Each structure stands twice: as structure tokens, then as C-alpha cells.
Amino acid sequence: MDARPVPVKRSLAKLPSRFAMVDARLWSNAATMRLDPVSLRLFVAVMEEGTIAAAAAREHLATAAVSRRLSELEQALDTTLFQRSNKGTQATAAAHTLLGLARGVLHGLDDIGEQMAGFASGLRGHVRVSANISAITQFLPDQLRTFLDKVPLVRVHLHERISTQIARAVADNTDDIGILNTGDYGEALTLLPYREDELVLVVPQGHALARRKAATMREALAHDFVGVHPGSAINNLLHRVAGEAGLPLKLRMQVTSYDALSLMVAAGLGIGVMPRGSAQIYMRSLKMRTVTLDEPWARRQLVICVRSLESLSPAGRMLVAHLQAG
């Protein structure tokens, strides 16, 4: 019996014609499905920005060029990624599935480049970080400065987000590291201890609570509040505490930053709640005071979240270690 392997071309020639045609189509599809990183990056940009025009502006390209790349990507995958109409483009279920896969591929390609370049010029790379405003205003400026002093070839890309958005960004591989309030975000994330902060009342000078060293939330709820943006941890906390006390939360206005909140409080438009460390920044120049909140929930734990330490690049693991130690 001859056990020698049969050449592929000869074996295909002996197949019935219909099988040979199917085989040829499969080889043809495999040959044409060449996905390039540029198209994947543009696809991710469109998904993140919401429109082709916004993605083109972000990537400094013509809108027509981005649209052409998307069409070529759909042809390569033989899949419709966007439903197009005179009202714009709508991402399909396939597009949402591809988004996570594309981010993983692009992140892996970035890691390859970073780690190979490191052999020639020392440790380099980039780390994507998202953090809530409490961490950004109290802890991160000094910590990032000292980290980058040690490893100047590493670039840290920092975004401010609310805690729920941070958890989602890390889980979806949009960011590598998140810093947020401890909690259950329903995601497969690794949470690591980071810092503790303390929430306080900020009140204008001359306010009825300004001479108090401490006050309860029940006492504070008698006054108008300047709140922070919906969905934030502090906003959710205030609504929960007011509901448990059976008292209304009198939100006179809502702002999106601690500097805006402090300016409104100093102008006498209401009182607010923010971390003590953040309030101290604004008290140097604004006419407002801090009052200790006599509540057990006023002390909060901030945590670092990652998908896993093993999934991080060397630069990412170094940053996590620095944040925990600093």
C-alpha cells in the first residue's frame, strides 16, 4: 500500500466539479478577507464618535475616505456593518460584535509595537486610563507626574468618566485601567484597592451651616443644592440618601465639574457635596467653607479596575503598581 501523501492540486482535481467549485469559493473568500489595521481603527472611531463625519474629523481624514474604507471592510467581511439612509448610518448587531474584536486586535498590535521597540530604546508604550473626577482632582496629578518622570517613554492617555462608564470602558477594552468608586458594576473586572476619600458639604460663607463643624444629611436637605451631573456616584448617593430620609432633594441646578460647583456655591446659589481634597483646591480662592458630613457613608473607597493584571502591557502593570504604592 502506497502511503505517500497525495499532492493537494491532484486531489482537488479528482473531486466532483460541484465540490471543487465550493472549495474554490472558500479559498477566494479567504484570499480577499485581508483586514488592515487602518480600516479597523477607522471603524472603531466611527462606532465611538457616532457618525462618519465626526470620526473623519478625529482621524484628520476626508469623510469620503472613511466611508470608502467602511464599504471595503464590509466587502471583506461579506457583512453589513451599517444601515445607511438619508438620516445617517445605524450600526448593526454585527458592528457591535466587531467593535470588541477590533479593539482587542488593535490593542494587541499596539502591544507588539511597544514591546519590540522597548528592546532598542528602553521601556516604552502607552496606557489608556479613565478615572472619575474625584481621583483626577485629588490624587492623579502628582502620581502621574512621578510615574512619567521614571518612565518618560510611556504615554498615559487619561479620560474623565463617571464610575459606571469607567467600568464599561475597561470591560470593553476601550481603556486598560480605570479608577472609580467601589461597587458592583456587573462586569467581569478585577478590583484593586487604591485610596479612601471623604465627602463633605461645601457651603457659602455666611450660610446657616457655615459656622457648623459637622452636620447630618437630614439637616443639609433643608437647603437648596447645587448637584453634579446625572449618573455620577455623588448624584446617585444624594438621591438615595434623600429617599431613605423621606425628604426631597432640592436641586437648584446641576453642573458637570467641581470647579463649576464651587463657583455656584461661592455665589450663594446653594450648597454641594464633594470630596474634601477637591474642595481644598477651590477654598483658596473662593468664599466658601467645608462642613464635615456626620454620616457613615461620607468615607468612600476608590479602587483600580482592570480586566486582569495579566492582560495589561508591561507599562500598564508598572502604572498599576505605582498607583497602589504612591
Image (cartoon, rainbow, N blue to C red):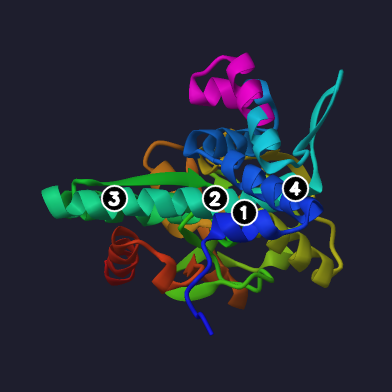
* Residue highlighted by disc 4: 21
Q: Position of residue 278 (x, y in %)?
A: 44, 51
Magenta region? 54-71
* Residue highlighted by disc 1: 100
Residue type at numbered disc 3: Glu
Q: Earlier in the sequence, mark 1 or mark 3?
A: 1
Observer-side mark, 4 or 2, equals 4
Observer-side mark, 4 or 3, equals 4
Is residue 207 placed above or below 236 in the rendered structure?
above
Residue drawn at 45 percent across, 52 percent down: 107
Q: Residue furthest left?
A: 121
Q: Earlier in the sequence, mark 4 or mark 2?
A: 4
* Residue highlighted by disc 3: 114
Q: Earlier in the sequence, mark 3 or mark 2?
A: 2
Q: Main secondary structure of the magenta part?
A: helix
Q: Earlier in the sequence, mark 4 or mark 1?
A: 4
Specify whether 195 is left or right of 180: left
Residue drawn at 36 percent across, 54 percent down: 111
Residue type at numbered disc 4: Met
Query: Contact, CB < 8 Å: mark 1 with mark 3?
Result: no
Residue type at numbered disc 1: Gly
Report if residue 246 is visible in the image. yes
Crowd band around label 3 with a 10 angstrom C-alpha radius: few (<14), some (14–19), many (20+): many
Residue drawn at 65 percent across, 54 percent down: 13
Residue type at numbered disc 2: Arg
Q: Position of residue 283 (x, y in %)?
A: 42, 44
Magenta highlight on residue 11: no
Q: In the rendered view of the protein, which quadrant contains the N terminus? A: bottom right
* Residue highlighted by disc 2: 103
Query: Contact, CB < 8 Å: mark 2 with mark 1?
Result: yes
